[in-house]
Image: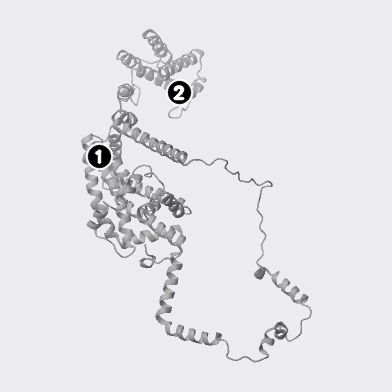
Amino acid sequence: MRPEDLQVNLRPRSSWEAMELGTALLRRHAGAVWRPWLLALLPLFAALNALAWALGQPWLAWLALWWLKPALERIVLYVLSRAVFGQAPGALAALRAQWRFARPMLGGYLSWRRLGPARSLLMPVDLLEGSQGAQRGMRRRVVAGPVYMQAALLTVVCAHFELALLLGCIAAVFLFVPAEQLPGSLQSFWGLLQDGPPRWLDLCFNVAAAAALAVVGPFYVAAGFGMYLNRRSESEAWDVELAFRRLRERLLARAAPLLVVFAIGLAALVAPPVQAQDGQAEAEDVPTLPVVFGRELQDDAGFRRAAAKAYEDPLIGGKRTLVEWKPKHPATPKERSVERPAWLDALAGLVALGAEWGLWILLGAVLLVLAFTARHWLPWLRGTGRAARRKAPAAAQVDELALPETLPDDIPSAARRLWSEGRQRAALALLYRASVEAMAARTGAALPPGATEAQCLRASRQLPGEEARGLFARMVKVWQYAAYAGRLPDDAGFETLLQQSQAQWAWTP
């Protein structure tokens, strides 16, 4: 990488300005980036959806495409890394170069580094610099150290942008629904999701997710590449180097004759004279300070005081007080008595590598088990499993009272008919409602709409007889047991309550 060939203006930038630099570079070379990006994305999307459709799990296509994003992001990084030097490759050339462009590093970014929060910043380090072993780890720390959190925040922001675009594609469908049909359409859509979406709806979701990925992915890679260029410029002082190189070019182009004349004149001035006078050697030993001040300085104490006073000025002296904590008893490093053999270090590294790969293999096995057993646990998460289907008929058996808005003229006959039809709760609800209206008419109480049983009992205290108050309290108790506890009276008890209420409230058949 030659800094003098860069097509961008190198200067000190913050991390956010560096991200904007990367997106500006993407906008300048949009065609060169999106053509190979889409040429690789569309066939991969079609193949994954066909395979997932054959397996009967369309959602696996979206998951696989999301997991393979680092392989597609190499295309964007390859194009931008050449375009920044003014050599943007063509679409077919960029695709052909992927077979050999940093192929050994792809496995890491599709496995243990796939979920790295600073992937956009560290991919240029691994794919463009080509360092190996410990040198690669050191380069990753140098480049990502001061801006790791900014790179992680870039990942979070781009993920939210993808989610917003996905939800926007789904919501855009309802923009074409007429306003009067919108509530019904939303309710039908929600019911369709609860019952299990059909395959065509899963395919539409995959298309929307791929569209969001196709739009946001290049911006994510470009912003990380801009941060990478800024960190290389900071750590290696590219801007200072370029400034000196431009200064050297200007001097060589415009001031070369002047430099020659200046060099000749300087040589003539510093050359020793051919003859020296006799008193010159003696004059060189004479102190020059009295000559400068025009008087003899016998004692330089005053000069020292003046110099010390001048250095007391904070603008000249520049002294500052630094306070730091130090331990009273600093620990002395212990010398190793026994040198650890090299084979033990190699064995420890091998065990650590095996443990790391073992954990990743275990994670992959768990993901595969979850993927192949999704047909068993996914319906249970959606609430459409066999247990939910067994409970659905029981939950759907709702005892609808279906009472008329006004009481019938013959309340006893209507209540007996409901009871004989097996609608016991409806019969008791009719008796309770008729008793409340009769009590309110006799006491003159104004009950609010939807009055509770407690409010009705308080109003019944104004009834002019103990028998009437006791009968109404009994009616409220029977209704509460039936409505809230499911405890219904037997036929004899219902008939007794009906006859007493008919006699008390004077219901005429």
What distance separates the C-alpha of mark 2 from that of mark 1? 57 Å
Residue under the image location 35 percent in, 22 percent down: 407
At which x and y percent is residue 397?
Answer: 31, 22
Q: Residues within 10 Å of mark 2 (few under 14, many from 20)?
A: some
Q: Amino acid at mark 1?
A: Leu
Q: Amino acid at mark 2?
A: Ala
Q: Nearer the viewer, mark 2 or mark 1?
A: 1
Q: How many marks?
A: 2
Nearest the camera: 489 or 215? 215
**Which residue is tagged 2?**
440
Of mark 2 and mark 1, the one earlier in the sequence is 1
Label 1 SS: helix
Q: Is residue 277 left or right of residue 402?
A: right
Label 2 SS: helix
At which x and y percent is residue 450?
Answer: 43, 28
Q: Residues within 10 Å of mark 1 (few under 14, many from 20)?
A: some
**Which residue is tagged 1?**
201
Q: Is residue 341 left or right of residue 92?
A: right
